[in-house]
Amino acid sequence: MIFGKPRQFLLFAALTLLLSLLAAPVAAQTPCDSNEGRLADIHSREQLKAYVHCAAQHIEAVGWEQAAQDFETSAWMDGDVYLFAGTLQGDIFFVAGSGLAAGTNLWDLQDSEGVWSTRELARIASDFGEGFAYYRFTSRETGRDEPKLSYIMTLERDGEPAGLGAGYHPRDTHGSCSPEVVRASLVYTERDVERFVTCAEHHLRQRGLQAIHEFNTDPRWKAGPTYLFLFDLEELFTLVNAGQPQLVGTVRDAAAYAPDQVPGAPETRRILASHDDGYVYYTFRNPATEEEGRKIAYFRRLLLDGRSYYIGSGLYVPADDCRNLPLARDIDTRDEMQQYVRCAQDLVDERGDLAWDLFLNHPQWIGGSAYIFVLDELCRQLVYPLDYERQQGDEPRCDLRDAAGNLPNQDILATARSEVGEGWVEYLWLNPASDEVETKHSFIVGGTLNGEHVSIGAGLYESQMQS
């Protein structure tokens, strides 16, 4: 009978499969699984809302007590993105990563602009069930008072209404586009270039014509391979092109980028005819290396005095092994460490000492106990982010001894200058994550900077190394 009715059979099979999927445990696949390890990249209300709703599902699955413990782990907490919960009267159940005791009352918490943030969150949760709150708060990452956007929703705890929420600090709003956070020398990923261009748009709206001069001259807006361009969208007339100033004043209505023959400006205009922003992909000469490389240009449409323009910037794409590199804090194998240091060498080859800003401030290059260091021919520190044993003055440091009396800088220099030009060096060093002296295994690669030999390295501590 079933074989005589194939359509009914297929419908029955489809319904059975759907019911089996609905019956599967919620924890098997959740909205924030894709964010694990990258929660700090949350930068939209939709992403934030999905993250909090995922946490609510986790509470329902394992209970409040277990969930509160889980929310203290890296799978749920990343820099400025963390979960909080409490009663609608301001008594907290937890604020992940804060160390605040359960029961602490935050009802009288007031920000630098006079906003009673806890009361505002409670009001939204109580009266509307869910929503977004806007206030200022100290960023865990920067230590500065910055704008914060939080989402809160209501759910039950022991039969009483409770609030569960999380927030993030926007990095590309007009109130958070400080040079300390957004500048050309820190552009390394697609997210970086989006922030950079959006902040440039805010700057243009605030500064007017003065901003055009700054885009061409200020190192905040022009550094190494990163610079801004600004076009009249209707005629494709070039107003700013800090990387190719000879093109300012020209019309780019037929410009094609060799060797791809991608018509950059016309293609941008085509995309912006129906989108507010976008990307164009092409091959182009990198002004930092004078070589052609893969480039991504991000651009945004804007309206000034009734006329349409677009502003954008480009990103030279690293080799695939470097583009897919884990964040510094997530590196825990020797293979990952080797690739991390080799990619740092590539960055020094491309940007020279402009790479230092990335090594010292970008999460791709510094985080947890992982960081890049660079020594010159006399073992002097060109890049070293930690206060421990940081060089004072300009004296050679090849006689530096570790806790066991060994001479690690001499070993580092010898490894970088060896025939193969790379290798591992072992010594005792302070782990910034544990504040304990541990055995450290550093991978070293030799390179050049301004014609001089340098040693580039980074290491793994025994306590963090995976097999």
Image (cartoon, rainbow, N blue to C red):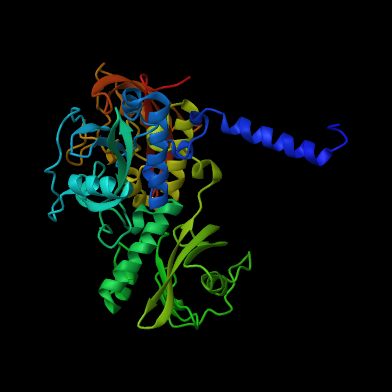
Give above or below for 410 relative to 226: above
> Where, quadrant-wise, is the N terminus in this rendering?
top right
Give above or below for 388 relative to 39: above
The image position of residue 431, as x and y in percent, is 28, 25
Give the residue displayed 35% in from the left and 19% down from the top: 463
Instruction: Indicate left or right for 293 with 231 as reference.
Output: right
Is residue 336 in view? yes
Instruction: Indicate left or right for 293 with 261 as reference.
Output: left
Instruction: Indicate left or right for 280 with 302 as reference.
Output: right
Give 351 or 144, whichever is nearer the viewer.
144
The image position of residue 178, as x and y in percent, is 25, 58
Q: Quadrant of residue 187?
A: bottom left
Give the residue displayed 28% in from the left and 36% down from the top: 161
Is residue 457 in view? no
The image position of residue 409, as x and y in percent, is 31, 29
Instruction: Indicate left or right for 386 with 288 as reference.
Output: left
Give 283 or 44, whichever is nearer the viewer.
44
Give the residue displayed 26% in from the left and 74% down from the top: 207
The image position of residue 428, as x and y in percent, is 30, 20
